[in-house]
Image (cartoon, rainbow, N blue to C red):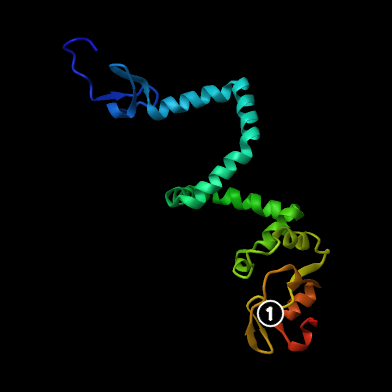
Amino acid sequence: MKPGKKPFTSKVCPACNVEKPRSDYYKKGDTVSYLCKPCSLAQNKARKEANPVYRERAKASLERNKDKYNANRRKKYAEDPAYKDNKRQQKAAHYAREKEAINARRRERFANDPAYRATVLAGNKRLKLCTPDWVDRAELVRIYRECPAGHHVDHIIPIRGRIDRRPVSGLHVPWNLQYLTASDNHAKHCWITEDLLPATS
């Protein structure tokens, strides 16, 4: 800075044309960066994405370290309440912005991808409370995935049902599942009688 010259307190960013305080610019010796911080970051990101060499390197690095990155994220999500809350807010904001497009993709995938449909059905939110932590979830998904055409996966002892008019709730476990035709499953609803229970040794 030239002797006797007063430091400016604000500056108009040439990229966004918004006057911002000095603190919104990166320090460069006695002066500040040409663009504000958000515009500088956006410019650098655009340059990197336009460079095919950088894209290939970034893709290779992500693939090489994917498991490590995901493990670190899961650990931080479990141990850091602030990080967990921030991620939930980000997810909620993203869903609010893209709700229609996200649900359209889900419906299309549910209709055309048997593996995805099986995963969704096996992990239904309503069933989570009745799914023990020790259950083999892969086995649950397999049962739903292999359900014959025209059949439903039914809980032998219903979830939140009645047995001889008494309230009952079975577990969401592989040995409490069976295949029933759609008509039989609808007729059964959430009722069961003692004589229909599987025999135990």
x, y (%) of residue 201? 80, 82
Question: From where the camera sits, is residue 96 visible?
Answer: no
Question: Image quadrant of residue 144?
Answer: bottom right
- Residue identifier under label 1: 190
Amino acid type of the residue tagged 1 in the rendering:
Cys
Rendered residue at 45%/50% (across/down): 80
x, y (%) of residue 98? 54, 47
Rendered residue at 48%/51% (across/down): 79
Rendered residue at 73%/55% (across/down): 111
x, y (%) of residue 70? 59, 43
Question: Image quadrant of residue 53?
Answer: top right
x, y (%) of residue 146? 81, 61
Rendered residue at 42%/25% (across/down): 40
Q: Quadrant of the N terminus?
A: top left
Judge by depth and name the residue closer to the eye, 44 or 201.
201
Q: Relative to residue 1, is residue 148 drawn left or right?
A: right
